[in-house]
Image (spheres, rainbow, N blue to C red):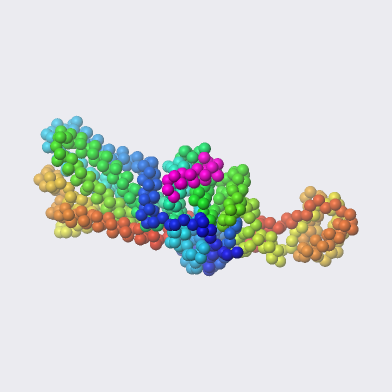
Amino acid sequence: MDEKNHRPAVSFWASAREVFGFFFFLGRRTGKTRVFFLLGMIPAAMGVLVRILVAGRAEDYAAVFNEILMLVYVTFYIVILPLFYGTSIVAEELEGRTLPYLTSRPLSKPGIFLGKYAAYTSLMFLMVTASLALSYFIMNGHRLGDPELYLTFLRYVGVLGLGLLAYTALFAFLGTFLRRAILIGLMFGFGWENVIQYFPGSTQRFSLVHYLKSLLPRQAASGGKFALLLFRLEPSPPAAAVVSLALIAAVFVALACWIFRTKEYLFEE
Amino acid sequence: MTAVIAAKSLSKWYGNVLGLNDVSLEIEAGITGLLGPNGAGKSTFMKLITGQMRPNIGEVTIGGRSVWNNFPLFSSIGFCPEQDAFYEDVTGWEFLTGMIRFHGFPPEEAAERASRALATVELLGDKDRRIRSYSRGMRQRIKFAQAIAHDPGIIILDEPFNGLDPLGKRKLIRLVKDFRSQGRTILVSSHVLPEIEAVTSKIIMIHHGKILAEGDIHKIRDLIETYPHMISVRSNAPRALAAAFVGDASILKMSFGPDGRSLVVETHARDAFFGRLQSVVVEGGFEVEEITSPDDNLQAVFDYLVGG
């Protein structure tokens, strides 16, 4: 072999960085991103409608956001986005037959996976944050001078960001070894996650949404007209919820990287 | 010469379907053609040597190092896959620079290499168009460009001529030959015989997952004893020439070519026939315009080997 042409391999982190750059850029261009960005505008549109149609007190608008719109994000938007982006990390390479462009390069396979995961999670995070900012400030437009408003906003962003990390990791993991990961993901995200909340005892800790709701501001968890939609049991302590979500994300990403490294992917003929 | 790519007892199957069956071969520097009909196992072999698939049995090595999951090895390999598949929403430029960056090149060098590769495949003028809008020929060319842009020592081209018009094919053939002169190892697969014949005489014939023959096409032909050699002699007096050969023990059959000026001879003893031809031509004062071997080509050898 001609040694002059032999360059050193790209390290794990450099692989992840290069793959991140390519897919973050590519992800912004796809039709899927445009559709989901528009979908993210629905809560904002709902906020505008509420402000126009419902003549209420300022506190009512804030309550509507906390107890309805936030639920749309937690139980729908940050589930549907990772479902489509997470499961597509491997599936789109197989269906589009583009995998050889990545796996015939001197890139670490776990680095490829991590790079795509990070690219898509970042893209989703931007979409969610843009949508959240719009709907949040529309509904709380009456108290823009209140510093507490911005702290709460950051808290919401953090909760949704953690949710994206965990859901994307889980769905991406499923996508590394299941052909129809999206169906299993749908059943988990919109079946199990919803049903398990109403089970007695500590079984609800077997859902991601439990930890996310545990992190929502106290105001959303108590006293409101819609409180029964949030919790049947006491939430987990915030620190435990953050650690649980971070751990779930890390474990599923690590498992997915390992599977992606060892599994042989064949195109359907 | 030492082998650059080596396969040892390589077998691969997909469920119950055998893709490759006990293949052992060595590929040296220069151009090697991998020839076989669709479904023969060419792409399976290509995917095994580029680490896309793991063999069920055996091993494939490049420069003595096992390929599967050995990603550092891929810095010296350029792979042009068979499928017409791309990240459609990026431009040719974005695609190529992205692929080059995956080899660890800094942005400036990636841009420089992308420019060079695009110029080589004559796509520089279309670099800012999205790949989605490229014609089939342009897509083939950008696929080739991503395989050569990082200056690899080994280039693996899986059906690279698919979808190219005759002019495009000629240009690509010239490019592939240019790369050989730079001392690289190039493996080209095709199911179209003249395409392989145009780039190399060093071939590997594959059929039903097994290697039928490998080596120089003309030498392979010589080894096929079952079929007589066909020799066509075009002269000013083909009938008189035929008369001179009547009764010659080295000749199995004689006929006249469609142009009416060629004598077509079938023989097992090619050297004896040429010796006799020389004396007949001199003694009879014949004018010989051309001597060709109609079956000393890939098509004939392939047909003979697969029993076609």
> Which percent across, then down, holds residue B114?
49, 45
Total tally of numbered discs in the picture: 0
**Residue, x 74% and y 56% (percent of image)?**
B293
User: How far across and how far down the image is residue A190, in percent?
Assistant: 26, 50
B234 displayed left or right of A227: right
Which residue is situated farthest in the left direction here? Answer: A223
At a point 51% along the width and 55% down the height, the residue shown is: A5
Q: Main secondary structure of the magenta part?
A: helix
**Residue A193's spot in the image, x, y percent?**
23, 53
Residue A45 pos. (x, y %): 25, 35
Say if residue B147 shows up in the picture: no
Depth order, front residue of A43/B134: B134
The residue shown at (75%, 59%) is B230
Is residue B118 inside the magenta stretch? yes
Image quadrant holding the N terminus of chain B, namely bottom right
Q: Is residue A106 one of those drawn in magenta?
A: no
Displayed quadrant of residue B215:
bottom right
Using the image, determine if residue A84 lies above or below residue A176: above
Rendered view: B144 above or below A40 = below
**Residue B183 visible in the shown view:** yes
Specify the segment rendered in magenta. B105-124
Viewer-nearest residue: A5 or B236: A5
Q: Quadrant of the C terminus of chain B?
A: bottom right
